[in-house]
Structure formats: C-alpha cells, structure tokens
Amino acid sequence: MSIYLSIVSVAEQNPIALMLAITLLGLLVGNVLSMIIFRMPKIIETEWNNQCYEHLEIENLQNKTTGLKLNYTSPSSYCPKCENPIKLSENIPLFSYLLLKGRCSSCKNRISLRYPFIEVLTAVFSCMVIAHFGVTTIGIVCLILTWGLITAAIIDFDCQYLFDEIVLPFLWLGLIVNYFGLITSLEQAFLGAIIGYLSLWSITRAYKIFRGIDGMGNGDFKLMALFGAWLGFETILPILMLSAISASVLQIALIYIGTHKKNLPFAFGPYIALSGWIYMLYGNSIDTIIHKII
C-alpha cells in the first residue's frame, strides 16, 4: 500500500513524467497486443478444426504433416513474408519500425503499418485513460479494459468475429469491479449486463423475423452486455446511439468512396467498443449534449 501511495504521490507531482511512463507502457502493451491480434484467430481456428476432426473421428493429417504448433509464446516473432526470426533489437515498439524504415532486415519487404499503429493507438488511449481517471484503482481497471477492447475490436475488424475468450472474461471482470462499487452499483451492473445483451438480441431477432436473415452476431450482444456490466444499464441507450451513428456515417463514407460495397456485411463490434470506451471517459458530457438536443 505504501508503494502504491508513493507512486500516486510522484505521479501527482510529475504529470509529464507520468504521461511519458504511460506512453512507454502503452507502446510495450501495444506490441504484445499486436502479437495476440495476429495469433489468436489462428490458434482458435486450429482448436475448432481439431475439435471438428475429433468429433467426426477424422484424422487431422494437416497438423501431422506440418507439425506447426502456434501459441502465444512460440514460435518467437518472425517476418510473415520470409519467416525470418525477428531479433530482440528489432522488436522494440515503434522505435525498431522507425530504425528499420518500415522494412524487414532480412527480405527488405515492407512491414505492415498496423503494428506501429496498434502500438501508438494503445499508448494514446492509455494516456487518455490515466489523464482522465489518474493513477487510481478505477484508472487501472479501465486501462486494462481499454487494452482488451483494442484487441477485441481489431480482431473483429479483421475477421468479423468477437471471441468469447476476450469478451466474457472482461464481462465478468466488470461485475467483479462493480461488486466493490468502483464505477456503479452491483445492481446497476447486473441489470446492465442483462439489458445490454437483450438490447441487440431483440433487435436482431426482430430483423430475422421480418427479413429472414441475421443482422448481427452473438458477439455484439455480449459486447453490449460487457459495457452494461462495467457502466450500468443507464448507459446502454447512449452507447447504442453512438455506435449506430458512427457506424452509419463511416459506412456511408466508405461506400461513397468505393472501398466498401453496399450489401456486404461489416463488423459492428469496433463501433460498439469505441463508443463504449468514449462514453466511459466522457459520458457526463455526452449526456449533457443529448439532453440539450432532446
């Protein structure tokens, strides 16, 4: 406890040093998130395939022939194009990308911009959370939630799937956090999880009845339940409104410039994640604006 109080005291006296430390932490975490975002879909897809092979009693010849066992710790980081192992000195968040001028040291192919983007995004969002909440218990848990949301949103953007392995643990964490009343009451959190899930579930069921097709995936329901568990049931409607408005505006813009076709599905999870995260930080200001409009 004394160490924690000392850190808080130093942070309050040196806000610039605090932001620098959080920036470096965000870059490091972003580097890890990049690895998780790249590997998690492949790992889970392999697990699903193995379960299907086992259930159907079919021998998995592919795994036997390749012998590749991908997990979160091995093999070590490598270039996805030439598969050359990346040295530790080449894996320093952001700085290595700049020093290598965005190219692999071995094959000289371009390194995707998504890696430094995720690192910088994580650093910026981390600084925004700590700047808003400070080095407090709420600030720390919201920082952890932010990292989880970045991971879930980018994976959903890539493959249009919100994995239970990310969403459900954070949903339960929200209920645990509010068991101690850190953000809202346990009653609000419990109702928020239920109403958050049912809000999108009911809309999707109605769409299915009238149109005969699914409008959203189950992961979107669980993500709304997550925010309900963290922020309470009263936040569900404004988060839904923000998500719908932001998704509509951006999708219309993408269709207009020709990068997205009109009838193709798109991931709604990133819009929910961003809207919920913004509301977590600036909910009071958003509520004031909504009340003025209404």
Image: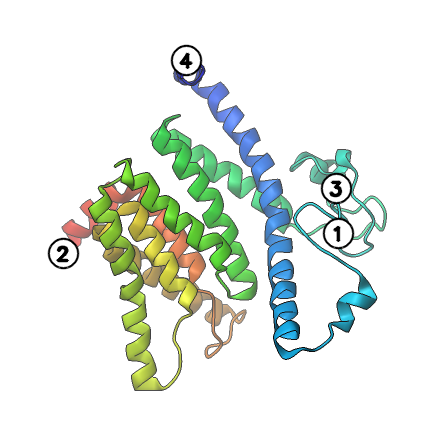
What is the C-alpha distance between the residues marked 2 and 3?
51 Å
Q: How is the image coloured?
A: rainbow
Which quarter of the image is occupied by the N terminus?
A: top left
The first of marks 2 and 3 along the sequence is: 3
Q: Amino acid at mark 3?
A: Lys
Identify the secondary structure beneath mark 2.
loop
The first of marks 4 and 3 along the sequence is: 4
Q: Nearer the viewer, mark 2 or mark 4?
A: 4
Identify the secondary structure beneath mark 4.
helix
Q: Give the labeled residue for mark 4.
A: 2
Give the side of residue 216 with respect to residue 287, left or right.
right
207 up-or-down from 139: above or below: below
Q: Give the labeled residue for mark 3.
A: 101
Give the side of residue 85 with respect to residue 70, left or right.
right
Q: Give the labeled residue for mark 1.
A: 110
Q: Amino acid at mark 1?
A: Arg
Give the side of residue 131 with respect to residue 205, left or right.
right
Tell me the tag on residue 294.
2
Residue 198 position in % (x across, y down): 28, 65
